[in-house]
Amino acid sequence: MRRALLLLATTLLTAGCAAPAAEVRVEELRRPEEPPSAPLKVEPTAPADMPEAVDEGDRILSFLTPRGITAAVRFRQTARSIGAPNRGALEGGACLAPKGPGFVHVSRSSCGTDEMVAIVQWALREMQREYPKTAPVVVGALSKPGGGRLRPHKSHRSGRDIDLGLYATGNQHLPHFQPLPIERIDFKKTFLLMAYLISSGRVTNIFVNHRLQPYLYEAARSMGYDRQQLDYLFEWPRGAKSRQGLIRHERGHMKHFHVRFACPDGNSGCVE
Ligand SMILES: [Zn+2]
């Protein structure tokens, strides 16, 4: 059985967005093949599927979620990511609203590719669905409406980078990125959000301080990920300079993690 839900209908211009933003419409088509309580599974080594083009430029990206459900996220692709994350630009970016299901957005740099904005909104909403009482995650910088240099970041220039906060234990609400003692970080929820994003097949890397990785690794292991999957996902227990694993060290990044997305289908000037 397939049921279609129109889940998120609006994306607003925020104060920092001078250019008109494309509307972002995320429509999720769920096929509940297994109950949401099914054990976690992931196929991180499967090649990423490109979204399928459908009517009027809409795209549908289908993938298996960490809960074993096939999700299909539908969005309209109008943005173009140009060049590399650390020297590129963005055309026709979609901009994230100041708040939405599962998140509050605290940066004026709100824009990115339609694909990234759609997947992030889907994943955060999925977290809220799974943990209805959870405090919203703080979303930081994406890119400026036209991309380009965004101080103090080196990247965030081409609409494919986004900073996301950590979950605190006890559903504590965090108004912005803030330092937390290790025992106050909810690593299980934080990793699950990462897993939802990665399951889309469109995330190339997540950057987070190496010191947090053993805790995220343990959270993933306790949730059923096997050794091969953990090796693929994490740089740890390899060193912070190994340049291996999808989840990698970046200096700082103790209060948030940084997610980088692949070049959208058909963006010929985009550089990974
Ligand atoms: Zn960042």
Image (cartoon, rainbow, N blue to C red):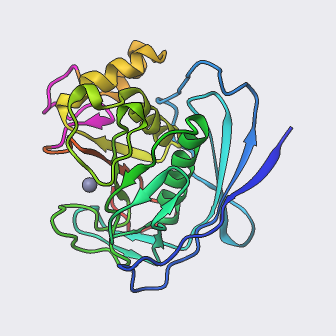
Query: Left or right: 181 with respect to 56?
Result: left
The image quadrant that residue 170 belongs to is: top left
Work out whether residue 230 or residue 28 is closer to the camera in this orientation and state it: 28
Q: Could you say where residue 247 lies in the image, as x and y percent from the top left?
A: 31, 35
Q: What stretch is highlighted in magenta?
A: 237-250
The image quadrant that residue 10 belongs to is: bottom right
Work out whether residue 116 or residue 218 is closer to the camera in this orientation and state it: 218
Magenta-drawn stretch contains 239: yes
The residue lying at 56 percent from left, 30 percent from top is: 66
The residue lying at 41 percent from left, 26 percent from top is: 188
Image position of 241 with respect to 128: above or below = above
Q: Could you say where residue 97 lies in the image, as x and y percent from the top left?
A: 49, 68
Asked whether residue 182 is in view, the answer is yes
The residue lying at 38 percent from left, 39 percent from top is: 172
Magenta-drawn stretch contains 30: no
Q: Main secondary structure of the magenta part?
A: loop
Instruction: Please identify the quadrant where the N terminus is shown.
Output: top right
Asked whether residue 235 is in view, the answer is no
Image position of 217 with respect to 242: above or below = above
Q: Could you say where residue 79 lies in the image, as x and y percent from the top left?
A: 49, 72
The residue lying at 35 percent from left, 36 percent from top is: 168
Q: Could you say where residue 25 lies in the image, as x and y percent from the top left?
A: 63, 65
Work out whether residue 215 or residue 72 is closer to the camera in this orientation and state it: 215
Image position of 178 with respect to 106: above or below = above
**Name of the residue lying farthest toward the right:** 1
- Quadrant of ligand 1: it is bottom left
